[in-house]
Image (cartoon, grey):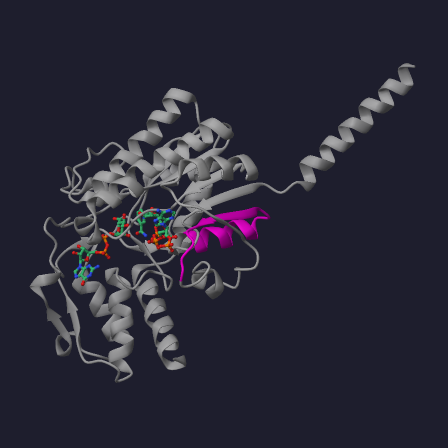
Amino acid sequence: TALRSLLSITRAKLRQDDQEFDVAKKALITGITGQDGAYLAQLLLSKGYEVHGLARRSSTSDVNLSRLQWLGIEKDVRIVDGDLLDLSGLVRTVTDIKPDELYNLAAQSFVASSWQQPVLTGNVTGLGVTNVLEAIRLAKPDTRFYQASSSEMYGLVQQPVQSETTPFYPRSPYAVAKLYGHWITVNYRESFGIHASSGILFNHESPLRGIEFVTRKVTDSVARIKLGLSKELRLGNTSAKRDWGHAKDYVRAMWLMLQQDTPDDYVVATGRTSTVRTMCEIAFSHVGLNIDDHLVIDEALFRPAEVEILLGDPAKAKAKLGWETSISMEELIREMVDADMARHRKA
Ligand code: NAP
Ligand code: GDD
């Protein structure tokens, strides 16, 4: 009898080990159709995750998967219809998928639009975070949660270099909404013990960046000018300074945060800042053009309240996550110009 029970315990243990070995971790990404969603999905797939993505249905096409297609992974992710505004749908999704990790990247993320749509921005970018956290709390409280917080929260900067302890001073409806999302994440961690981390990410770009953001607007225009498709580039405040990194590097930091035993908040930045004009000069000179022959300053593109400078201190991310940026701003902008040249040549 003793031998039989020893055998059955050993078999049960082997089955358990098998399951632990075989079963892939499941991740759910909101905002999977966006820049970061696409790169994060690619990273998680490369690590053997089963990747699910929440996406909004649209009447013109089922879902815009162009970024996932660009990376060649659109068939590898499982898309589920959903919206950050729909709590019951989110609860159903978390109940069905039972994710080990949930990355909340969805947002109305364009700062300039947030003055035009402040209520929508507040609902999606702010309260939407609570909807996702509620879905976790109700349906699977041991899900690890990542919130996409933003350096925009520093706004009118209170310290020359911004770290996790720098006070916030948001300067746009978007930043105010992100600040709410940031603190509700901290609150659910402290109130309910949810493994919830917040990444305070500084600007990060790539060839998959939306065309409305300044780097991509510049690299796309430079490519068009070089190819004779356009003559000028109209910009607003070119003296604003940003700490720009590559999105591919930054999604790695998101994943690292959820692999820690203890949830926490981290600044993710390069530690270097440049003006919009310097970034433009890199783009123009990469294709042998002179910026002053093409740049036009347009007062209509200035913002009602500007964030003049952002410069992050990534020391904590380096010390605790072992995270470092690997792509310089020059390499990033040249890669974006090359990608836009290739796109326009093909079109
Ligand atoms: P993005 O390209 O603008 O992507 C935003 C995503 O959110 C898209 O997939 C969009 O879907 C989705 N979305 C918008 N409203 C939604 C709603 N109501 N329900 C569900 N999904 C919705 O942004 P990103 O650059 O990848 O940034 C990812 C996240 O990081 C955002 O939260 C952004 O605010 C934050 N962040 C970005 C940076 C940066 O420099 N990139 C820095 C700090 C923080 P559609 O395709 O349907 O529009
Ligand atoms: N978009 C845009 N278009 N920005 C311009 C232009 C223009 O024609 N001309 C000057 N700028 C300046 C803006 O005034 C701002 O100071 C800077 O370029 C960067 O603008 P964006 O690229 O639109 O990014 P952002 O810094 O406002 O916001 C991005 O980074 C945040 C993190 O700091 C977004 O990705 C946010 O979602 C993110 O949270």
Inspect the magenta stretch and tell me whether residue 56 lies in it. Answer: yes
43 is higher (above) or lower (below) than 295: above
At a point 22% along the width and 43% down the height, the residue shown is 119
* Depth order, front residue of 2/299: 299
At a point 22% along the width and 64% down the height, the residue shown is 279
341 is higher (above) or lower (below) than 78: below
Quadrant of the image containing the C terminus: bottom left
Q: Residue 15 location in percent, x, y?
A: 76, 32
Q: Residue 43 location in percent, x, y?
A: 50, 52
Left or right: where does residue 41 sit relative to residue 178? right
* Occupied quadrant, residue 12: top right
Q: Residue 265 location in percent, x, y?
A: 35, 34
* Depth order, front residue of 124/329: 124
Q: Which residues are magenta?
A: 37-59
* Depth order, front residue of 304/200: 304
At a point 32% along the width and 71% down the height, the residue shown is 337
211 is higher (above) or lower (below) than 80: below
At a point 84% along the width and 23% down the height, the residue shown is 8
* Depth order, front residue of 308/73: 73
Q: Is residue 133 visible?
A: yes
Quadrant of the image containing the N terminus: top right
